[in-house]
Image (spheres, grey):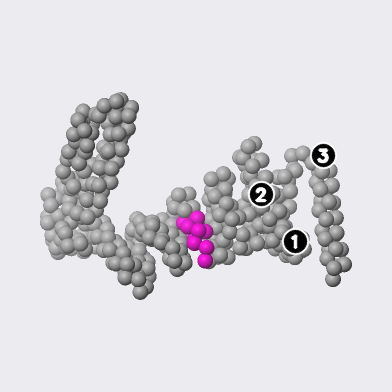
Amino acid sequence: MKQNIIITLFLILFCIGLGFVTQNKINQTRPDLNLTGEMRYLPKGPALDMTSCGIKGVFADILWNKALCYVTRHFGIDRNFPYLARIFDVITDLDPQFVKAYHYGGFLLTSAALKTPEAIKILTKGVKNNPNVWRLQYDLAHVYSFFAKDKINSAKYFAMAAQTATNQGKDASILFEQATDYYVQDDGFEEARQMWRNFANSPDKKRKKIATEQIKRINAQEMIKHLQSAVDLYKNIFGHLPKTLKNLQGFKTPKGTINQIPKDPFGKAYTLINGKVSCQLFNNENYAKNIVYLKKIIALFKKKYGYFPMTLSELISRNITKDLPNSPTGIDYIYDPISGDVQ
């Protein structure tokens, strides 16, 4: 047994040595091939099983180091990575649980190689081979969101990552909210509600309360979108905006006649301000965000000029910001130029 191991190791070392000698000969005659040329002949399928000699993990690690050298070399020379997708595909064939290879493969294929379809392919493979690794599901959602601009799949994989992380005892509320945003943007209101129902399927009362509030928000967003479409249609027909949402009662839309304007899920009236439909909860949340933003740019003005602006419009004329956020409540912001406070 021991003798067989020694013979096997000797053969492996002999093959590696022979490979170095052959590669050096190639480098002397064709210096343009070297590291890049090697990647052209990476085996796949049955050939990969034969060449790995039964120690796939070791070969995956060796190829991982080669991949880092390949990226570093071309990043500094031409930023051209024709074999990058193939390298990570072979690494993960050798070791399907090599999570780091999927993670960095997806990152490099999008950020360095600018090859979004290949990044999606390698990360999809990673999610399939590692269904309990929420980070890979999140990586795939990120690629669909920021590079592929695919809202449906962004929502799908953000939701998957959130559920996987939750099942592992992690607080994934932010991931659920990201998934909700993408579902709502693509009119996937029912998918978003079902996601939160699944989240609430737990003895944890806190989770049930969070899910209930989130479903109310989704219902409000769906009604706001419906009423906004009616307001826009009203303007196109009559040439002006309705004075209030009550003017829409009896108005016919492609989705049917609006018989009455309901209250929002929080028991308040929907609002129509400057042609935009919303609800009081969202108005208040947006108002608070705008106040934070205004205070931030007022502080930047003070740091640059040594005094507070006389008016908020001076933030535009002095090139601190291009424009000011509209007040979502319809009430003008109250600004004190002496203290720099805004409310």
Confirm whether residue 237 shows in the render.
Answer: no
The quadrant in which the C terminus is found is top left
Q: Indicate which disc residue 28 carries.
A: 3
Q: Indicate which disc residue 52 carries.
A: 1
Q: Name the image quarter holding residue 50.
A: bottom right
Residue 328, given in percent of the width and then of the height, sits at 21, 46
Residue 101, given in percent of the width and then of the height, sits at 60, 55
Local SS, label 1: loop
Whole-number angstrom distance, CA of label 2 to CA of label 3 = 22 Å
Whole-number angstrom distance, CA of label 3 to CA of label 1 = 27 Å
Q: Indicate which disc residue 67 carries.
A: 2
Instruction: Please state the extent of the stretch shown in magenta in the rendering.
Output: 132-141
Q: Mark 3 is on which residue type?
A: Gln
Residue 257, given in percent of the width and then of the height, sits at 18, 63
The answer to whether 154 appears left or right of 318 in the picture is right
Most extreme residue toward the top is 305
Q: Which residue is drawn at 27% across and 58% down?
A: 221
Q: Mark 2 is on which residue type?
A: Ala
The answer to whether 3 appears left or right of 139 in the picture is right
Whole-number angstrom distance, CA of label 2 to CA of label 1 = 17 Å
The prevailing secondary structure element of the residues shown in magenta is: helix
Q: Name the image quarter holding residue 222.
A: bottom left
